[in-house]
Image (cartoon, rainbow, N blue to C red):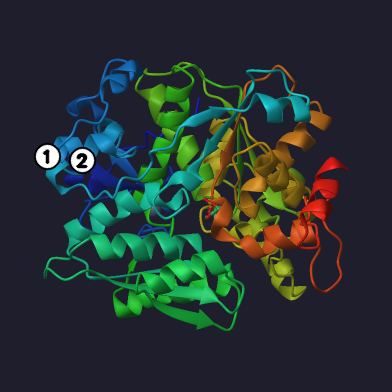
Amino acid sequence: MRQLHLPINDLTMSVMSDLAFQQCMAPDCGAAYGLDVVLYACRRCGALLDIRYDWSRCTVPKSLSFFESRWPTPGRSPEARADFSGVWRFRELLPFESIEKLVTIGEGRTLLQQADELAKKLGVKPGCLYLQYEGFNPSGSFKDNGMAAAFTMARRLGRSRIGCASTGNTSASMAMYARHTPSSNGHSMQAVVFVGGDKIAFGKLAQALDFGAKTIQIDGDFDQCMKLVQEAADRLGLYLMNSVNPFRIEGQKTIMYRVLEGLGWEVPDWVIVPGGNLGNTSAFGKAFIELRELGLLKRIPRMAVINAVGANTLYELHEREKIRFDNGRWDRTRVEAWYARMSAEGRRAKTVASAIEIGRPVNLPRALRSLEAMDGVVRQVSDEAILDGKALVGAYGYGCEPASGASIAGLRLLLEERAISPSDRVVCILTGHQLKDPDVTVNYHRGSRDGTGAGSYANPPVRCAADIEAIAKLLDT
Ligand SMILES: *Cc1c(COP(=O)(O)O)cnc(C)c1O
Ligand SMILES: [Zn+2]
């Protein structure tokens, strides 16, 4: 059984007096750092960091049903504000800051939806398909869950300049939270966003611009932006808000708590999530590993991570190269060789689902750990399948952005493979709001101007004369 427990060494000892600390995820290192040390990787070995808690000294509820009692109460007290947040409602499970200092703008107020009509269409039994629509967050994507936690930390650290590389939603979310989080000098934080060329969906760019983020368009793709922003963090003192920041992962754990809550604390058979930079993949695994460690859950659901065919690094590494987390001893040489081939062949990520158009996911090791803990699988789906998945979600009344359609496309594929059976209980995560990328949606339904055809579930607008008889005729046919 995979545990987060790592050996205690000299470095660990010095911070063990803290309830929460940062720890290198490599088991043969396990170096620990205080929360106030700004780091995105271990100083000693370069591995990613986890936020860890000394649970024995935290107040953890004895049962998950404790959280049901915590419904929002009116008022502006720290408790009222925290209870309104779908992240901080679960604060005992990410206890790194005191309640008066938590940053929230009302994120995570999302509700698991039972989707029987869609289930029927897909050949899943009624009562077995659920959608977790994270598009209902303040900035319209799940990223807000992570930002609430990361901004809480940024404020604690007194950072006034924050940055991210973004395919769009990270920048929209970060820019929004920056406006709501005063830094230590009393002004709001300066948000700096790196986006790749002209790839960003307009709904997302519009948000970053409107919220006043300094938006830098780089001649390059997301992977180049990611590298640059990491350099900028080192050289220019930007506090990094991408999901390498371990506090992002803490906030995003709560998506799983809400899923469980929606199921009356019963564990589903499968969680299906699109994979981009793999922050969610990492967070979901960590959430379940911890719940099991805490004795709050006995069983862990399986996870399916869905890549786009044009951005399928995790699929290639996990399913073809068979790279496994292997207790932190995953085969770095083979991963590096794979990346070297990708560079040599000039391969770049390319998919219509811009939010998952990522070739070098920064959270790869954390994601491998989650896949191991959740007995996970990775699949790749075509852009066409992604758009059809998105259209089906829309047709049954929820709506989502293209990347989220990968969850549905992945479910269809796994049903076809019989890896998922029609009576399995499945939760598909819908990561972003329907209105983020309207160009793609309208082109799908109408056929695009450059003449490419409309999608299989297209609902094109129809032209009609401005005449009531003509309209009557049209509606009769
Ligand atoms: C960021 C994002 C993703 C990718 O999530 P990761 O956690 O980076 O894998 C998927 N869908 C949407 C809508 C996103 O904004
Ligand atoms: Zn280390």
Q: Is residue 34 left or right of residue 64?
A: left
| Vertical relation: 229 (above or below) 84 | below
Q: Is residue 167 visible?
A: no
Q: Position of residue 147 (x, y in %)?
A: 35, 53
Left or right, 301 with respect to 53, comes to right
State whether label 2 is within 8 Å of ligand 1.
Answer: no
Residue 71 place in picture, x, y as percent: 27, 26
Which mark is drawn over residue 233? Answer: none
Mark 2 residue crowding within 10 angstroms, few (<14) / some (14–19) / many (20+): many
- Give the percent coordinates (x, y) of residue 22: 29, 48
Disc 1 marks a residue whose amino acid type is Ser
* Point 68% across, 18% down: residue: 126
Q: Which residue is mark 2?
A: 81
237 left or right of 405 in image: left
Identify the residue shown where x is 49% and y is 50%.
279
Q: Residue 249, position in %: x, y?
A: 40, 47
Are the residues tagged 1 and 2 within 8 Å (C-beta)? yes
The residue that disc 1 covers is 77
**Front residue of this view, candidates 128 and 242:** 128
Using the image, determine if residue 355 lies above or below residue 121.
Answer: below
Q: Quadrant of the C terminus?
A: top right
The answer to whether residue 105 is visible is yes
The residue sitting at 12% across, 68% down in the picture is 186
- Secondary structure of the residue carrying numbered label 1: loop
Left or right position of 445 against 163: right
User: What is the distance, in whole Å, between disc 1 and disc 2 at their CAs?
Assistant: 6 Å
In this rendering, the answer to whether 432 lies above or below 130 is below
Whether 277 is drawn above or below 400: the answer is below
